[in-house]
Amino acid sequence: NQRLVEEARDAVEKEAEVGVLRLELSHFEERLSSSRASADAVARELEAALAASQEAATAVIADLAAAKRARKEAEQALSEERATWEGACERQDAQLRALAAEGDEAREEVARLQETLSSATSAFEVAER
């Protein structure tokens, strides 16, 4: 009889331990479920952040490509403008050289005319005497 009572007491204690373990397991499962939910939420946030970062990177790449095209177009326009100005400067330089040559010829002609006038004046003065 004593043995049956002890076995019954052991069985009750073991059942109590199993009950405590089941309760602890239930709490653990609740925490695990909560942790999984938190991990899922964090994963969704990270995925959203990654998608936003990828969109931003794509936009930056597009902006850089547009800036590169604009720079190339500006360099081309500047090159064309430079060629236009260089051509205009060369034409102006040629015109200035031609005017300088005409001025030199005009000075020579004036010098000849002054000599002729001087000679004529001298001849007139001699003829008057």
Image (spheres, grey):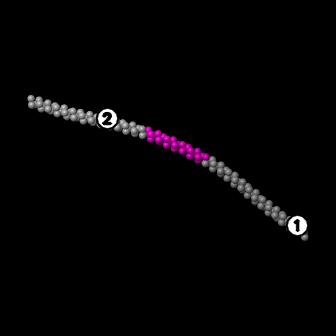
Quadrant in the picture for residue 117: bottom right
- Residue 19: x %, y % from top left: 21, 33
Q: Is residue 35 above or below residue 87?
A: above
Tell whether 84 sits left or right of 42: right
Tell which circle, 2 or 1, labels the residue nearer the N-terminal end. 2
Magenta stretch encompasses residue 73: yes
Relative to 127, 99 lies left or right: left
Dominant SS in magenta: helix
At label 2, which amino acid type do we have?
Answer: Ser
- Give the labeled residue for mark 1: 124
Report which quarter residue 72 is drawn in.
top right
Q: Amino acid at mark 1?
A: Phe
Mark 2 lies on residue: 33
Is residue 83 shown above or below 105? above
Residue 122 vs 24, above or below: the answer is: below
Residue at image position (65%, 50%) is: 85
The C terminus appears in which quarter of the rendering? bottom right
Quadrant for the N terminus, please.
top left
Q: Position of residue 15 (x, y in %)?
A: 19, 32
Secondary element at tag 2: helix
Q: Residue at x 40, y 39 (%)?
A: 46
- In the rendering, at what x and y percent does residue 71 appear? 56, 46
Q: Is residue 67 left or right of residue 13?
A: right
User: 22 or 99: nearer the eye?
Assistant: 22
Magenta segment: 51-77
Question: In terms of secondary structure, where does tag 1 sit?
Answer: helix
The residue located at (34%, 37%) in the rendering is 38
